[in-house]
Image (cartoon, rainbow, N blue to C red):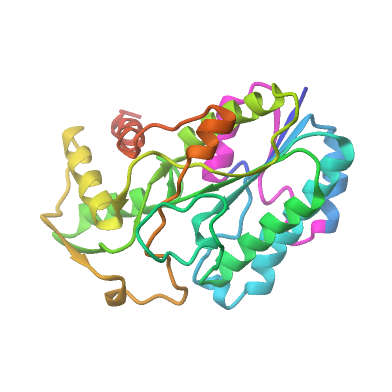
Amino acid sequence: MTALVFGSNGQIGQALGALLDDAVLLSRDEADFSRPNTLPAVVEAINPSVIFNAVAYTAVDKAEEEEALATVINADAPGALAAIAAKRGIPFVHYSTDYVFDGAGDTPRNETAKTFPLSAYGRSKLAGEKAVEAAGGHYLIFRTSWVYDAFGKNFLKTMLRLGAEREQLRVVADQIGAPSYAPHLAAATLQALENAQAQAAFPSGIYHMCNAGEVSWHGFAEAIFEEARKCGMELRVESVEPIPTSAYPTAATRPLNSRLDCSKLRDTLGVTLPDWREGLKDALEILCSPC
């Protein structure tokens, strides 16, 4: 039984690859998501028992200028993969985002909440959800938020770099969400899939999946520096000024409320994730370890 992971060089894809014993891992260079018509042949050649799609166009601001390309990668390609998975009778696992919501209010959104993306990226990811749903078959769509890892480019790595270079930083404090550690997401994904396959009827659908708890980007930055110093990192940063989103304009509008209600994941698939602080500690333990 072989798993096929698309996006093996991304954060979630890499974390999945580390946990799967029998898997074919394909990077974006090895599977062209800008040409969805080429993907079915890739699947046929590998003959997998399950497909994980961890590929996404994630350049949120650039997507405002490249919405057509973002939609091909984030919607058309996943739709094509979901269709061939349905045809072959195998599960398809796909990842989406809190950006499908408008970010209004301060309560966590559940899977039945009305979607209203504010950006081209969000629209492309919502289109991807609909494409996967339309393909039918056995599928799991996991909406997550604020993904990071000890590897790659992400908020954690950026803060550590800036914290080593500067004494003062300014970080947005009115966007609230749950930083989600890629290895925790990968482990939860595999457990959720196993539990779904054990049920009499495969519970296809959208599920919210992120680490427990909530924090602002500013609070996350302060926690990063606190934990980094505990494990011996030398940092120059002395103060982190909280600023509103309006003080840091970007091409794409970010949702202020990125809170996701993950109770469906718990109740239907029996999966819960640790508090976001546990993920941060795990990531920094890796970064602080001697090479």
- Residue 21, relative to residue 88: is it above or below? above
Decide whether residue 17 is among the magenta residues. yes
Query: Residue 161: x percent and y percent?
Result: 29, 53
* Residue at the image position 44 percent from the left and 42 percent from the top: 151
Instruction: Depth check: give the residue in front, 141 or 65.
Output: 141
Decide whether residue 2 is among the magenta residues. no
* Residue at the image position 75 percent from the left and 35 percent from the top: 91
The magenta segment: 10-36
* Residue at the image position 45 percent from the left and 49 percent from the top: 260
Q: Quadrant of the C terminus?
A: top left
Answer with the quarter of the image where residue 104 lies.
Answer: bottom left
Query: Residue 108: x percent and y percent?
Result: 41, 52
Instruction: Depth check: give the residue in front, 259 or 161.
Output: 259
Query: Residue 4: x percent and y percent?
Result: 73, 35
Answer with the quarter of the image where residue 276 lies.
Answer: top left
Left or right: 29 as drawn, with respect to 263 = right
Residue sitting farthest toward the left: 238
Residue 77 visible, this angle: yes
Q: Quadrant of the N terminus?
A: top right
Query: Residue 269: x percent and y percent?
Result: 58, 30
